[in-house]
């Protein structure tokens, strides 16, 4: 799997969403939404907790250099190695270099958005190293040869029947549709991989600067196997994952699982501080932390857009997003989808490549309501739309010429009220030829894009005239 | 007698003549002396929401001039348009400029219709009668930007004969989103169809919203689905006797 998906554009994809995707996605996300709501209702101090979480993340991204320096020092003093990767290519090369130094033939991976971001599996495979995903969802999409379509449930777009068919085809077995049975098949295959892999690769949910601790929040136990069975553990983590200390970690552990899966706490919460210190201890002999920038420090320079880096990757915004739920994650054309993807990808890939994404929202605001660290997603969407439409200090405008001309024309005619009023009288006449009863079932372009889904009400535009006549009558009566 | 200025919104202006007439009648019945500034056009939200902040300014200035002639409160039948004026106009102009001062003034005295009725006039019952099963779609900007969570329901509760049925996913967007409907028509359609599905399943014969945009979308969707369920602006329901 894990080619970084090719960006094809939201609009193009959204016109051909496979019918199975929205129903699979809606089924899964509605479970998360009700689970989250139940957990939130149990905590009367939830809103206070969100505010504290937001404040800590804000403070951290504003002082990232301080915490990253502390983190590096602490990881090193715990016996770990720290590598700085400015780009995705740098990160891939660093991991490959470590693998080569240890004669690695096979690596087992726990679920990681950072390695999806850099396309690590593909890179390692090209160099002859097998990289096996061991999270069930990731294992499924690796077999399918696609990227993830949800932050925490990468195979959310697939139903159990599709997964069974995939297992049957790729593993050359006769796989049943029972999810427990499917998990058993995967577990049996993966057990073998855990025992033979020379390297474990993980991401990380948080990096605690205070002690140089990598925190992993998982549910399947595979994360533990990846980070303890092989003698070598390499963690690839975005620099935005740093948090100040253990006290702040308690806040995020309360927020994360509740927001993500509706759990109070995930099944496994691992704290990894360096490699094993003595032969008797558990864990790998060597621990490497690859700190990934890949555009993050550039995003930090934008005082509005940088709030995206507060994200703790819970996926709650996608679960409540009516757009996401109708198109699925692949529509976002990148490793990260949903509302958070719509504000991250245009900043990472640029508004030339991802210029449609800031518009892939009705600005309904449901995402901001549930974000555990209060990222103002609609505000950032608007900020990025301004970057696309009119350009800003970070990028020139990328909106098409017809769109910009339309906007200029609209601005002119809405600002000159005589022209608007003239149009208001003209439109009902022009549109009357398309009228069928009270409705306009099909209108000319661009309104045809409206009427292909539902009719347009007919243009009545009668209020101004009514008001005028009424005022005249009243004047007459009072004289 | 207290005064108010009518902000009819561009969608109201084009499509909802009778709703605007009902709004006028209701407010006058409550003893409000109404002014209608004919220079008003659109609030500029379609430009603003599409990223053309620079091109929104001229439209906003037209609005500010039109409603600046009187210092009476401004009332409109849309939480979305009112929110644009209330929450975004001040950000369009630099602090300290005369335009900013005017925008702040206008923002401080604009109200959405149900907000004006329930929170300003303190009126919750205007004697409407509507013996039907009614469900309600909470519009996004009305609900989240304006924070109007209870006003519409308070008004619905006072209507005689009305049986309220709550809508599944009441607070989920209907897929309108302004230009979104023509930018991503397929996505807008799926969202609208989900909303229509929930309305059909509710068992109500009438669905109410406080937003002309959602109304166009939902009413059109119900019509396309061949449903007899009536989609109405809350103003038209309040005018039922």
Image (cartoon, coloured by chain):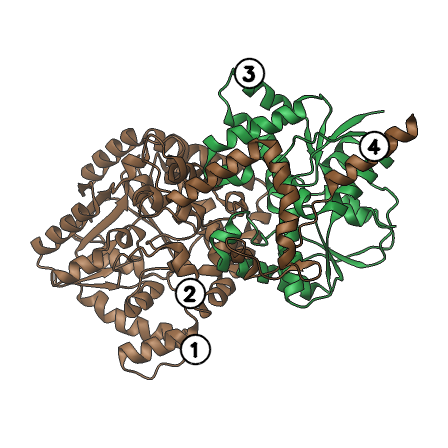
Disc 1 to disc 4, C-alpha distance = 75 Å
- Going from N to C along the chain, the mark reached first, 2 or 1, is 2
Q: Report which residue position mark 3 lands on.
A: B98
Q: Residue B116: x, y in percent?
A: 74, 34
Q: Report which residue position mark 1 lands on.
A: A178
Q: Report which residue position mark 2 lands on.
A: A16
Chain A's colour is brown
Q: Residue drawn 54% across and 56% down?
A: A444
Query: Which quadrant of the structure image shows residue B228?
Result: bottom right
Left or right placement of residue B220 versus residue A274 in this view: right
Q: Residue drawn 87% across and 55% down?
A: B161
Chain on which label 2 sits: A
Judged from the image, the secondary structure of the residue bearing numbered disc 1 is loop
A394 vs A127, nearest the viewer? A394
Question: Do badges 3 and 1 share one subunit?
Answer: no
Judged from the image, the secondary structure of the residue bearing numbered disc 4 is helix
Q: Residue A217: x, y in percent?
A: 37, 52
Q: Residue drawn 57% across and 31% down?
A: A416
- Marks 4/2 in contact by CB < 8 Å: the verdict is no
Left or right placement of residue A301 versus residue A266 in this view: left
Chain identifier of the green chain: B
């Amino acid at each position: 799997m894990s080619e970084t998906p090719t960006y094809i554009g939201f609009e193009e994809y959204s016109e051909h969403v496979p019918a199975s995707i929205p129903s699979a996605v809606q089924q899964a996300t509605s479970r998360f939404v009700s689970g989250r709501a139940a957990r939130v209702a149990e905590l009367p101090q939830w809103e206070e907790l969100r505010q504290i979480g937001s404040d800590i993340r804000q403070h951290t991204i504003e002082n990232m250099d301080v915490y990253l320096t502390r983190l590096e020092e602490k990881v090193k003093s715990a016996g770990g190695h720290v590598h700085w990767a400015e780009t995705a290519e740098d990160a891939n090369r660093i991991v490959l270099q470590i693998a080569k130094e240890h004669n690695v033939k096979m690596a087992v991976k726990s679920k990681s958005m950072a390695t999806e971001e850099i396309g690590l599996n593909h890179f390692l495979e090209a160099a002859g190293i097998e990289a096996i995903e061991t999270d069930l969802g990731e294992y499924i999409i690796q077999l399918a040869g696609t990227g993830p379509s949800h932050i925490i449930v990468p195979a959310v777009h697939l139903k159990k029947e599709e997964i069974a068919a995939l297992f049957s085809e790729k593993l050359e077995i006769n796989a049943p549709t029972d999810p427990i049975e499917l998990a058993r098949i995967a577990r049996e295959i993966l057990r073998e991989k855990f025992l033979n892999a020379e390297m474990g690769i993980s991401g990380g949910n948080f990096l605690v600067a205070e002690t140089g601790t990598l925190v992993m929040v998982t549910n399947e136990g595979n994360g533990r196997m990846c980070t303890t069975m092989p003698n070598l553990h390499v963690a690839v983590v975005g620099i935005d994952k740093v948090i100040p200390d253990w006290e702040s970690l308690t806040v995020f552990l309360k927020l994360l699982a509740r927001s993500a899966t509706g759990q109070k706490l995930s099944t496994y919460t691992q704290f990894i501080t360096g490699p094993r210190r003595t032969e008797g201890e558990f864990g790998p002999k060597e621990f490497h932390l690859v700190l990934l920038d890949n555009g993050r420090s550039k995003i930090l320079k934008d005082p509005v857009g940088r709030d995206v880096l507060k994200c703790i990757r819970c996926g709650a915004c996608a679960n409540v997003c009516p757009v996401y739920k109708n198109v699925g994650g692949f529509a976002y054309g990148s490793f990260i989808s949903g509302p958070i993807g719509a504000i991250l990808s245009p900043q990472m890939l640029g508004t030339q490549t991802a210029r449609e994404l800031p518009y892939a929202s009705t600005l309904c605001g449901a995402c901001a309501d549930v974000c555990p660290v209060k990222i103002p997603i609609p505000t950032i969407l608007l900020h990025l739309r301004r970057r696309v439409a009119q350009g800003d200090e970070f990028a020139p405008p990328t909106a098409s010429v017809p769109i910009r001309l339309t906007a200029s024309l609209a601005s002119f005619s809405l600002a000159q009220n005589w022209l608007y009023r003239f149009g208001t009288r003209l439109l009902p006449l022009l549109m009357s030829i398309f009228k069928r009863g009270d409705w306009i079932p099909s209108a000319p372009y661009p309104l045809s894009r409206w009427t292909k889904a539902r009719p347009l009400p007919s243009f009545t535009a009668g209020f101004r005239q009514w008001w005028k006549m009424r005022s005249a009558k009243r004047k007459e009566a009072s004289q | 007698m207290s005064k108010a200025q009518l902000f009819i919104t561009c969608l109201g202006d084009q499509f909802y003549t009778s709703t605007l007439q009902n709004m006028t009648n209701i407010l006058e019945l409550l003893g409000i002396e109404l002014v209608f500034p004919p220079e008003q056009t659109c609030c500029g939200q379609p430009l603003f929401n599409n990223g053309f902040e620079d091109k929104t300014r001229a439209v906003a200035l037209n609005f500010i001039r039109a409603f600046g002639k009187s210092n009476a409160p401004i009332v409109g039948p849309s939480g979305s348009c009112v929110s644009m004026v209330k929450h975004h106009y001040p950000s369009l102009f630099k602090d300290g400029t005369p335009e900013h001062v005017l925008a702040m003034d206008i923002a401080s005295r604009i109200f959405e219709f149900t907000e004006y009725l329930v929170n300003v006039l303190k009126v919750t019952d205007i004697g409407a009668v509507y013996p039907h099963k009614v469900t309600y779609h909470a519009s996004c900007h009305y609900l989240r930007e304006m924070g109007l969570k209870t006003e519409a329901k308070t008004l619905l509760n006072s209507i005689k004969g009305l049986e309220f049925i709550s809508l599944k996913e009441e607070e989920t967007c209907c897929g309108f989103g302004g230009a979104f409907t023509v930018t991503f028509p397929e996505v807008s359609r799926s969202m609208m169809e989900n909303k229509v599905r929930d309305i059909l399943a509710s068992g109500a014969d009438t669905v109410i919203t406080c937003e002309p945009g959602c109304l166009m979308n939902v009413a059109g969707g119900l019509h396309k689905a061949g449903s007899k369920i009536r989609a109405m602006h809350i103003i038209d329901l309040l005018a039922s006797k």
